[in-house]
Image: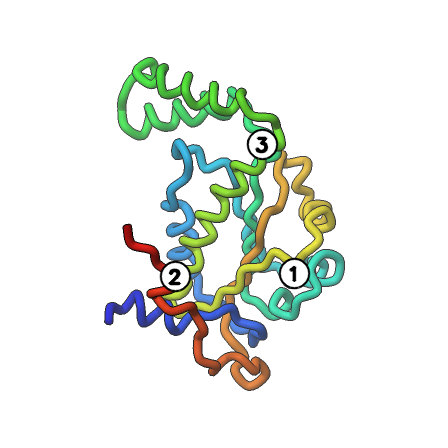
């Protein structure tokens, strides 16, 4: 069994954390994995807010997400999708491609046209929903990366999005929260499921081979 599978068997959605700080190098690895995650057209239409400030975590716990992992986590990552996607953002991305690959931006005109047309064909709500799905791909990368670093991570949807956006001032940044993830270390003594066997559907039921 590969180390990755061993790490994924070790990983679970931690219910209680012990307040221990995640070392910076481990956090950097998780953030780099998020950065390297794929997205449709490569646009990455989201931002990740990285929160370690205890006062901010406590305020989020009080006003937006009453889940015990939040104040006891080392870090809280908020995956926030772009509220609106504009032609200017697409242009900025094309310039980044050209600079990174040392090519003429004009050579990307057809690609830029296709991306822009796709965005303009959808409503703002449709584009936000599309962006949110891309953020979930990044979340998946973060969860796997955390497992390989043996850092506990808990993804969460059960929170008040509007309140969280207000606490973090996301509207002013053109963002809306989608999903959050706590990073830290499990409190095995106070987490009743810390040593429980992982439950997953059998492979023969989960996978369909054609």
User: Measured along the vertical axis of the image, is residue 73 above or below residue 180?
Assistant: below
Mark 3 vs mark 1, CA separation in Å: 31 Å
Question: Earlier along the polypeptide chain: callout 2 or callout 1?
Answer: 1
Foreground mark, 2 or 3, reads: 2
Whether residue 25 is visible here, answered yes or no, is no
Crowding near pointer 3: few (<14 within 10 Å), some, many (20+)? few
Going by the image, does 164 lie left or right of 5?
right
Looking at the picture, how far across and down is residue 73, in whole percent?
Answer: 57, 67
Say which quadrant the N terminus sits in: bottom left
Q: Specify few, some or many for label 1: CA neighbours under 10 Å numbering under 14, 14-19, or 20 or more.
A: many
Residue under numbered circle 1: 57
Residue drawn at point x = 38 percent, y = 56 percent? 29
- Disc 2 is placed on an element classified as helix
The residue that label 2 is drawn on is 206
Residue extending furthest bottom?
189
Task: Determine whether the residue tagged by mark 3 lies in a helix, strand or loop.
Answer: helix
Q: Which residue is drawn at the image coordinates 51% and 68% (left, top)?
A: 13
Image coords of residue 201 (percent x, y): 42, 68
Q: Residue at x 42, y 27 (%)?
A: 93
Residue 159 position, x and y percent, is 67, 56
Q: Are there few (<14), some (14-19), or many (20+) residues within 10 Å of tag 2? A: few
- Which residue corresponds to the image point at 67% horizontal and 47% vertical from the top-left? 168
Q: Secondary structure at mark 1?
A: helix
- Cβ atoms at labels 2 and 3 below 8 Å apart: no
Check disc 3 and report the residue beneath it: 126
Instruction: Inspect this view and state whether residue 101 appears.
Output: yes
**Which of the two marks, 3 or 1, is nearer to us in this view?**
3
Find the distance from the CA under tag 2 to the CA under tag 3: 30 Å
């Amino acid at each position: 069994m590969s180390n990755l599978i061993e790490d994924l068997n070790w990983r679970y959605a931690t219910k209680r954390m012990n307040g221990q700080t995640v070392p910076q190098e481990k956090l950097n690895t998780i953030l780099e994995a998020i950065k390297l995650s794929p997205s449709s057209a490569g646009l990455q239409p989201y931002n990740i807010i990285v929160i370690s400030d205890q006062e901010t975590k406590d305020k989020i716990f009080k006003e937006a997400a009453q889940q015990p992992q939040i104040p006891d986590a080392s870090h809280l990552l908020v995956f926030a999708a772009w509220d609106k996607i504009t032609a200017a953002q697409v242009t900025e991305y094309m310039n980044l491609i050209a600079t990174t690959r040392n090519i003429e931006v004009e050579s990307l005109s057809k690609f830029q046209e296709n991306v822009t047309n796709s965005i303009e064909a959808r409503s703002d709500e449709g584009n936000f929903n599309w962006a949110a799905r891309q953020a979930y791909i990044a979340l998946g990368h973060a969860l796997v990366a955390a497992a390989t670093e043996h850092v506990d991570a808990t993804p969460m949807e059960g929170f008040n999005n509007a309140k969280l956006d207000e606490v973090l001032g996301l509207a002013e940044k053109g963002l809306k929260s989608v999903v959050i993830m706590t990073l830290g270390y499990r409190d095995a003594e106070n987490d009743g499921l810390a040593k429980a066997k992982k439950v997953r559907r059998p492979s023969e039921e989960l996978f369909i081979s054609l």
